[in-house]
Amino acid sequence: MRSTDELMQEHRVIERVLAVIDAAAEAREKGGDLPPTFIPTVVHFVRNFADRCHHGKEEDNLFSAMQRRGIPGQDGPIGVMLVEHDRGRKYVRDMEEAGKRFATGDASALKVALDNAIGYSGLLRQHIDKEDNILYKMAERVLTEADDKELVQRFEEVERERIGAGKHEEYLKLVEDLEKEVGISSASEGSAHPHHD
């Protein structure tokens, strides 16, 4: 499997959580309740799986490999991706902050948390589209086979160092639990890695 294939598989998992965010916001609009654990669980997933692990693979490995092969960093598409990663982090910080206020009894904070979650979802959907259809295709054109092998190896190290060995399955289970919570059947979205119980 190529390094970009692995990143695209992770995108499919992240998109499942974006669908959960959208479904939760819609349910809330119609007067439904969200469990108090919902926002902290989404924040936990996004911060660890999407940001520390997935974005870590991109920022610390893929992007620098691409730059070594002549793709501009700050001013080109990589620069745009980095700016969007930072915008995403701000949404997550604000979502977490509002989630904490909600957990301590500030009912109005749930709307703030969900507004930030929706902002994050919208940002990430178009961000993923750009990476899948533009950035990764550029990477596939410029990276050598040796570059790619090294990236795949580095990606494994990033997972071990940042989220822990064997944690990938736990995150997939977390996504399934979130989907159940908002009434999405996980089979409809597909799974990044085949999931075995």
Image (cartoon, rainbow, N blue to C red):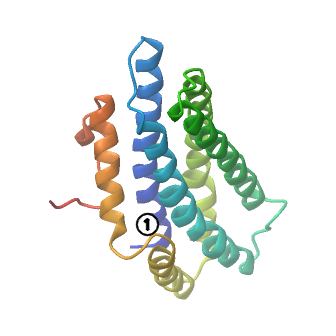
Closer to the camera in the image, 165 or 8: 165
| Residue 68 place in picture, x, y as percent | 73, 81
Quadrant location of the N terminus in the rendered image: bottom left
* Residue 179 shows in the view: yes
Q: Using residue 177 as the reference point, say whether residue 6 is left or right of it.
A: right
Q: Position of residue 99 (x, y in %)?
A: 55, 36
Say which of 59 and 49 sits in front. Answer: 49
Residue at the image position 62 percent from the left and 76 percent from the top: 61
Height in image: 134 above or below 184?
below
Q: Residue furthest front?
A: 104
Label 1 neighbourhood size at 10 Å, few (<14), some (14-19), many (20+)? Answer: some
Looking at the rendering, which quadrant does residue 125 occupy? top right
Answer with left or right where residue 114 lies relative to residue 86.
left
Left or right position of 143 against 148: right
| In the image, residue 152 above or below residue 180 | below
Give the camera-side residue of 78 and 21. Answer: 21
- Residue at 62% across / 46% down in the picture? 127
Residue occupied by mark 1: 6
Q: Residue furthest left?
A: 197
x and y, in percent, of residue 51 in the image: 57, 58
Q: Quadrant of the C terminus?
A: bottom left
Tag 1: residue type? Answer: Glu
Q: Is residue 36 left or right of residue 50?
A: left
Residue 19 seen in render: no
The answer to whether residue 136 is above or below residue 155 is above
What percent of the width, then of the height, locates residue 171? 36, 57
* Location of residue 156 with respect to 126 vertically, above or below: below
Q: Outermost residue toward the top?
A: 30
Number of numbered discs: 1
Residue visible at 32% across and 38% down? 179
